[in-house]
Amino acid sequence: MEAVGLNARREANYTSEIVASVYAYPSDTLDNAEYMRRCRFVPASSAESLALETRMNLIARLLSQHPQLTSEIDAVVVASGTTMTMAHPSDPKNVAFADLSPLILRQLGRTNALGLDIKACYCSGFLRGLQVADSLLANPNYRSVLLVAAEQGSRFATAASNRSSFCYIVSDAAGGMVLRRSALRSRAGIVDYCGYTDVGKLDWVGIGEDAASIIMLGSRAADATQTMLLEMAHTLLARNGLSVRDVDWLLPIQTHAGLLEEVRRKLEWPAEKLLWFGDLNGFSGSASIPSCFAEQVEQGRIQKGQLLLSLAVGAGMNCAGALYYA
């Protein structure tokens, strides 16, 4: 497992600090009855329009709320497993297209900045992207990095070929953070992260051969997810000499309430310090952590200088965790 830790940051005397965050949800929100109706018939909104709306609204909000930051963004890192078409699509109309990062750079007006896309980590994609952004900022030539996670899971959730009950919580969202290289100081920036890929469980979670359905091996995948989430939490807390009392918020992927409740119970984490809003926003995969973060910052629940622990497990199976200050 890779390690960062406080010692390496003290030697370098810098950190990657979160200086802005944004989120976007599709304007076409659904209640349970409407969701079930769409599972039986053709969805009212096309996959293309939902993807465009979610992605571009996020950047429009960033430009509106933080116009002074855009000129210093030297790299854009995008994590997504569900929004982009493939080079060899199952549907002839689903033609190959550019990755998301060039589109975001164009909207930002940054013609000479770096664009990177992370794809196959799925639900852990944002935390993997956090590692990439932090590594880029280790190079003094990069001032700020925009990290975006965008998922359009509903296109898989409503597919006629879907056979997984997991589909009922899958949703769409986008979330983003601007991270800046800053001088190391107390209660600021990324503290540590960890993660790995268990290739022995490669086929347990993923996208079906038709490129339209979700594969989820039920209880086996759920048990493995719980084990990995707990492992990430224990690793980060132990490695940094922290206890549950030292962390202000647990912000995990917004997956099944029952699974996360079991993780919370085994960590002996106070219920009031768990951020979970899956009953309202569904589970938007890699976008669920940054969109939840940005929304709770906007609402004043997460405050500057508070320490967060985020945990994620995705297809692969990839797991990741991060300790960072808001």
Image: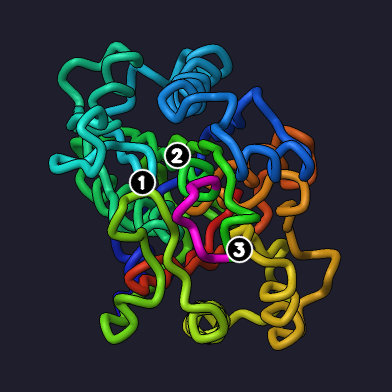
| Left or right: where 318 falls relative to 59 | left
Q: Residues within 10 Å of mark 3 (few under 14, many from 20)?
A: many
Along the line of sight, which residue is nearer the eye, 9 or 88?
88
Q: Is residue 319 above or below residue 19?
A: below
Q: Residues within 10 Å of mark 1 (few under 14, many from 20)?
A: many
Residue plotted at (32% across, 50% down)? 211
Identify the mark at residue 150; answer none if there is no mark: 2
The amino acid pointed to by label 1 is Ala
Secondary structure state at the residue bearing disc 3: loop
- From the top left corner, tell me how far across and down residue 110 is, in percent: 25, 16
Q: Is residue 202 above or below residue 20?
A: below
Residue plotted at (36% across, 59% down)? 207
| Left or right: where 3 falls relative to 281 | left
Residue plotted at (28% across, 86% down)? 200
Q: Is residue 159 magenta?
A: yes
The amino acid pointed to by label 3 is Pro
Residue on which disc 1 sits = 79
Quadrant holding the N terminus: bottom left
Is the Cβ of the residue at disc 1 closer than 8 Å to that at disc 2? yes
Residue on which disc 3 sits = 252
Of callouts 2 and 3, which one flags the residue occurring earlier in the amino acid sequence?
2
Marks 1 and 2 sit apart, C-alpha to C-alpha, by: 7 Å
Residue plotted at (20% across, 29% down)? 95
Of callouts 1 and 3, which one flags the residue occurring earlier in the amino acid sequence?
1
- From the top left corner, tell me how far across and down residue 129 is, in percent: 35, 51
